[in-house]
Image (spheres, rainbow, N blue to C red):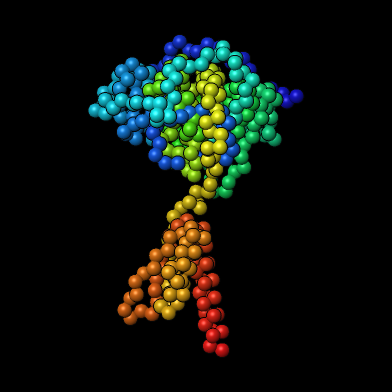
């Protein structure tokens, strides 16, 4: 048995907080117009709060919205009346749009799904992953044994700072495990990133050794059960448990997962996660077979690159092929865009401009040179 590294006596395991702090209650949901490796089998939602601005805050007392300058997120506050001009755009959630119309939260005493299994995916930075694993795996091993859950962290991909923590098990066991991971993060120095998805969505900084952040990855199809009708559920979660809860506007690259950022103390996160698990398990099947999961990829490979190559005029037709078939094949195989310049008077060469990721550009260049060599060889054989 691994020696315990954590205090298992949470200060509040059964009852929600009666009041939420004025600064700690940001609940958020954002609209999504575009589409981030393993499944969140039980995260449930069927939509998001619609907004006409990138950053909109919904006040639970006035049901009006106000524009804020948050980090690409739509936040819901429990206090402070809305004052901006955009405050009159009301969110609507209709059945035909697929929104969940639940307004009340499940009870922490509801054990009807106590033995149901849930799988969480959490985005962490490379440095945070080190803290969660611990020396020789001591931290993650201790959490697995104490909570009776399965937990693992994906390998680091060269060129990226992102890794995926997965935790699976029974509802309350997973909530406890995630809270232990949050506790482990309290001991690490706070990192700041200026790019999505590691950039903090909340404008409220973490208090060192007191509050921390968990970045849950939730399929977009399962967001509605967390949001509830007109944001009722997400507001209650942040009000009852004194946490900030913000959903990213954008899908994580190459996926239809959304980032749901939870910020608060370890105890508050534990209680909130127990409720979130009960919300998600209500409609876990909505993501089965419909989710494209986020896989961290090297930022270096996604950076755009441009290269130009000149080819003899008499070779251009062969490189293009009949009806453009050959150049289209190069574009399809490489993934690069290839533009062919106009013939210039007095020049015996044409310029090909190749644009795409560095990898795509290099692939396109290789294919073009290969086709050039084949054509030169064909012509040489024809003259023999």
Q: Position of residue 130 (x, y in %)?
A: 61, 36
Judging depth in this view, the residue of 100 and 209 nearest the camera is: 100
Please determine whether, in this image, residue 298 is positioned above or below residue 58: below
Figure disc tally:
0
Can you tell which quarter of the image residue 235 is in? Answer: top left
Please determine whether, in this image, residue 324 is positioned above or below residue 108: below
Please indicate, yes or no, whether residue 69 appears anywhere in the rendered image: no
Q: Position of residue 194 (x, y in %)?
A: 43, 40
Q: Position of residue 344 (x, y in %)?
A: 33, 76
Judging depth in this view, the residue of 107 and 323 nearest the camera is: 323
Which quadrant holds the N terminus?
Answer: top right
Residue at left offset 43%, top offset 29%: 98
Can you tell which quarter of the image residue 162 is in? Answer: top right
In the orientation shown, which residue stands out farthest toward the right? 1
Judging depth in this view, the residue of 121 and 144 nearest the camera is: 121
Residue at left offset 39%, top offset 39%: 33
In the orientation shown, which residue stands out farthest toward the left? 85
Q: Position of residue 254 (x, y in %)?
A: 49, 44
Image position of 284 (left or right of 87)? right
In the orientation shown, which residue stands out farthest toward the front? 96
Image position of 83 (left or right of 174)? left
Residue at left offset 45%, top offset 10%: 18
Please indicate, yes or no, whether residue 97 appears anywhere in the rendered image: yes
In the orientation shown, which residue stands out farthest toward the bottom? 384
Image position of 8 (left or right of 272)? right
Please determine whether, in this image, residue 204 is positioned above or below residue 372: above
Which quadrant holds the C terminus?
Answer: bottom right
Residue at left offset 33%, top offset 16%: 61
């Amino acid at each position: 048995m691994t020696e315990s590294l954590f205090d298992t006596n949470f200060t509040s395991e059964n009852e929600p907080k009666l009041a939420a702090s004025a600064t700690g209650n940001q609940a958020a949901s954002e609209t999504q117009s575009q589409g981030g490796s393993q499944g969140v089998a039980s995260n449930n939602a069927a939509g998001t709060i619609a907004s006409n601005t990138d950053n909109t805050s919904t006040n639970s007392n006035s049901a009006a919205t106000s524009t804020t300058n948050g980090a690409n997120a739509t936040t819901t506050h429990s206090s402070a009346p809305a004052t901006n001009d955009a405050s009159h755009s009301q969110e609507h959630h209709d059945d035909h749009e697929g929104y969940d119309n639940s307004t009340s939260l499940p009870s922490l005493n509801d054990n009807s799904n106590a033995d149901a299994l849930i799988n969480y995916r959490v985005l962490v930075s490379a440095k945070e992953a080190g803290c969660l694993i611990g020396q020789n795996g001591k931290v993650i091993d201790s959490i697995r044994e104490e909570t009776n859950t399965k937990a693992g962290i994906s390998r680091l991909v060269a060129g990226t700072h992102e890794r995926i923590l997965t935790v699976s098990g029974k509802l309350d066991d997973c909530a406890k495990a995630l809270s232990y991971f949050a506790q482990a993060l309290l001991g690490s120095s706070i990192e700041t990133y200026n790019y999505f998805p590691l950039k903090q969505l909340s404008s409220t900084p973490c208090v060192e050794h007191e509050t921390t952040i968990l970045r849950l990855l939730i399929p977009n199809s399962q967001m509605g059960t967390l949001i509830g009708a007109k944001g009722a559920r997400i507001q209650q979660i942040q009000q009852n448990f004194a946490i900030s809860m913000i959903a990213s506007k954008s899908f994580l690259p190459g996926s239809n997962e959304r980032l749901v950022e939870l910020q608060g103390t370890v105890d508050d996160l534990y209680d909130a996660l127990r409720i979130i698990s009960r919300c998600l398990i209500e409609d876990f099947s909505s993501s089965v077979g419909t989710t494209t999961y986020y896989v961290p990829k090297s930022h270096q490979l996604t950076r755009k690159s441009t290269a130009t190559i000149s080819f003899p005029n008499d070779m251009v037709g062969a490189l293009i092929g009949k009806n453009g078939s050959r150049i289209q094949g190069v574009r399809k195989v490489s993934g690069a865009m290839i533009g062919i310049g106009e013939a210039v008077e007095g020049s015996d060469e044409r310029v090909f401009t190749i644009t795409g990721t560095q990898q795509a550009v290099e692939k396109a260049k290789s294919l073009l040179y290969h086709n050039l060599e084949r054509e030169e060889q064909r012509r040489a054989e024809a003259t023999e």
